[in-house]
Amino acid sequence: MKDFYKYNNYLLKQNMKDSSIYSYIYYLRKFLKWHEEVIKDPFNKLEKIIIKKYLKSISTDASKSSINNYINFFKSYNNFLISEGIQEDMVVDGTMRLKQAKPKVNKDNTVNEKFIENLLQKICSIDGIKNYTMLNLIAYSGLRAAEVTELTLEDLDFDERVINITGSYEKKVPMNSHVESCLKLYLKEIYTMEDYLFVNERGTKYTDTGLRWILRKNCPDSNITITTLRDFYKLKLKEQGYTTKEIDKLLGYTTKHKSYLDKSLKEMLTPSEFAKIFNVAPITVIKWCNKGLVKAYRTDKGFRKIPPSEVKKLQAVR
């Protein structure tokens, strides 16, 4: 039953974001390990009573938001098992979800500056300067979680006051005084010479899923997400007089305004389609994109699209 590859492909066909796919695969591994150790019977299909028992076992260390994320995973995995003919019935339903307090957001789905400042200060006092700095980069520079985790010391240009984002696409993000002082404090007090700017306790770089977990841990009863922090930055740019095109460029939504030489965005390939051409797993293509081996663009919703011309380029070097 541990067919992670098939489930991974199923999630890709659902047009889920990379971070959600990684999370769901992680949830699946964790659940199956628990099932093996606690239930001690081979896993055949999902059972409501087993799911509830598992959720109860993790509830002491997980927030309501995290529990609901697990329920979303179980619903997805239940649908996958049905599509594969492994299970006939749907055992996960909306009644299993936990009620959460309404987030302190405005009508435009943004939070006010005072709330953001209080949240970051709370994280600084409880979790330390490192986690505080990473989330600061999202709230006050608009970086994606994956962009924060990929940062190196060389990407910081304090003379020009910009953060250089490299990889499958490149951009220069302005470094305002708030971000600059925060980074300098981190470099002085915490940073050690590593391959990446931020590494965890195991000595490896953070994942975007890990960064989301840090935020959920400090906002257990709120719907504040990484997207909320980026929307806050977007609002700040609007207040400073930036145009929509300029804001989208800073946030990395370049596909909305760019005319592509190859083909239109709709005719570009998804990672799953690209993977079939080279007979590899879709996750391999995503890794190629992250390393810059394959050029990919992000839609305004964050999905990757690959120009057909990248097929010939990769075939030439393989």
Image (spheres, grey):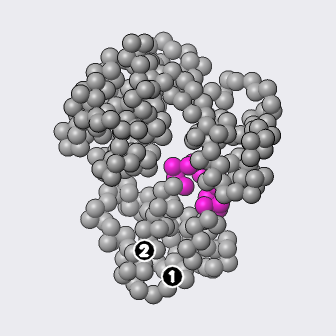
Q: Is residue 242 above or below residue 179?
A: above
Residue drawn at x 63%, y 52% is 284
Task: Give the Cα separation between the discs numbered 2 and 1.
Answer: 10 Å
Assign a secondary structure to mark 2.
helix
Residue drawn at x 67%, y 71% is 83
Q: Is residue 103 above or below residue 10?
A: above
Name the residue tied to disc 2: 33
Q: In the rendering, which numbered label is found on residue 43?
A: 1
Q: Is residue 165 above or below residue 44?
A: above
Nearest to N terminus: mark 2 or mark 1: 2
Report if residue 12 lies within the magenta region: yes
Residue 49 coordinates in the image, percent (x, y): 42, 80
Label 2 sits on what residue type? Lys
Numbered range of the magenta stretch = 8-21
In the image shown, does 166 or 127 lie closer to the viewer?
166
Q: Residues within 10 Å of mark 1 (few under 14, many from 20)?
A: few
Assign a secondary structure to mark 1.
loop
Q: Is residue 22 above or below residue 311?
A: below
Label 1 sits on what residue type? Phe
Residue 154 coordinates in the image, percent (x, y): 43, 26
In the image shown, does 22 or 241 lie closer to the viewer?
22
Residue 281 coordinates in the image, percent (x, y): 66, 57
Residue drawn at x 59%, y 71% is 3
How many numbered callouts? Answer: 2
Residue drawn at x 61%, y 47% is 286
Q: In the rendering, which numbered label is found on residue 163?
A: none
Report if residue 183 lies within the magenta region: no
Q: In the image, 250: left or right of 65? A: right
